[in-house]
Each structure stands twice: as structure tokens, then as C-alpha cells.
Amino acid sequence: MIDLFPPFDPGHRRTKRRPLRIRRLPMRLIAPNVVTLLALCSGLTAIRMALENRYDWAIFAIVVAAILDGLDGRVARLLKSTSRFGAELDSLTDFVNFGVAPAVLLYVWTLHELRSMGWIVVLIFAIAAALRLARFNVMLEDRTRPAWHGNFFTGVPSPAGRCAPCCRSTLP
């Protein structure tokens, strides 16, 4: 019989293979990431609602994403399950929810009338959100910053981007 998957080490003796076991993860490790993924679903739904010209639902979905974004970190700290994976997932979710979704909403709602200039405004908004999150992620790994600095937030939080569509609707 031909072995389709020979061992990497040619001197290795073939032994009886054990079945793969799936390691169980405690719910306390999964819960914060589930909240973050629900926030991502809400942000992507906001984009869909904007493309369907259902602006009220799009704004509502962005607000729900902001609420879930506030909860995921609290849940992680409460359950003592903070992780680098969770921080990265949260940053990517923040970029979609508060960088891309409000930008797409504004473009579809009103900036499309400006054609290329409106698209440039949308690109600048989204790029600024991406740069802000990248800067934040790099600052997390800075070993020279003082310990007390970790207790304070630096800069403008990405969820502030959700205010753009809301502020636009209140202008005359």
C-alpha cells in the first residue's frame, strides 16, 4: 500500500496514529469574541442597509455596533479573558464598523452627488480610521511607555466615527 502522506523524517518509524482531538475552549474565552463578531455583523448590516437606501436602519445598526463594541472589552476584562487575538479582532471590527460603514453610508446618502470629490472624502475618512487603529495597535507594544499610560485612552476613539451620519442628519 502506498502512503500518500509520508512522515517528514525519513528515519521516523511509523506508529499507530491517534485521532485528532479538538481541544475544548472554555466559554469565558469565547464570549468576548462572540460579542465582537456580533458587532461586526451589525456593521456589515449597516453597509447593506445603506446600499439599499434604508438609512434609518443603517444608522441604527452602527449604533448597535457601537454598543456591542463597548461591551466586548468589558466582558473580556470581567471574565479575565483578554487576549492579543481579541484585541486584533476588535481593531478590525472597529475599522469596518466605524471607518467603512459610516463612510459608505455618507457616500450613498449624500456624497455620491459630488462624484469623485465625494469618494475622496470617503477614502480619507476610512484611511484616517485605519491609521488611527494601526497607531493604537503599535502603541500597545511600546515597551518604553509608562505603566500608568495604560489606564488612559489616547486619541479619538474609532466609535466616534459613528457620529458622522448622525450629525449630518441634524444639519439644516
Image (cartoon, helix red, strand yellow):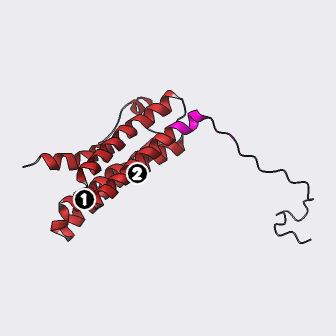
Quadrant (top left, top right, bottom left, bottom right) of the N terminus: bottom right
Residue 3: % across, % down? 87, 69
Numbered badge on residue 134:
2
**Residue, x 22% and y 49% (percent of image)?**
164
**Camera-nearest residue between 15 and 12:** 15
Q: Write the start and end of the magenta stretch as one range.
A: 22-31
Q: Quadrant of residue 49?
A: bottom left
Q: Dividing the picture into quarters, in which one does residue 163 lie?
A: top left
Indicate the position of residue 91 as horizontal and vertical percent values: 42, 47
Relative placement, left or right, of 54 versus 7 is: left
Q: Residue at x 39, y 40 (%)?
A: 69
> What amino acid does circle 1 point to?
Asn
Residue 99: x percent and y percent? Answer: 32, 53
**Does residue 158 sit above or below 125 in this rendering?**
above
Q: Which image quadrant for residue 131?
A: bottom left
Which kind of residue does numbered mark 2 sit on?
Answer: Ala
Residue 96 in sight from this viewpoint: no
Image location of residue 61, percent across then percent down: 32, 47
Q: CA distance from mark 1 to mark 2?
A: 31 Å
Q: Residues within 10 Å of mark 2 (few under 14, many from 20)?
A: some
Q: How many marks?
A: 2
Q: Give yes or no for residue 27 being in the magenta stretch.
A: yes
Question: Farthest residue in the left direction?
Answer: 172
Image disc number at residue 53: 1
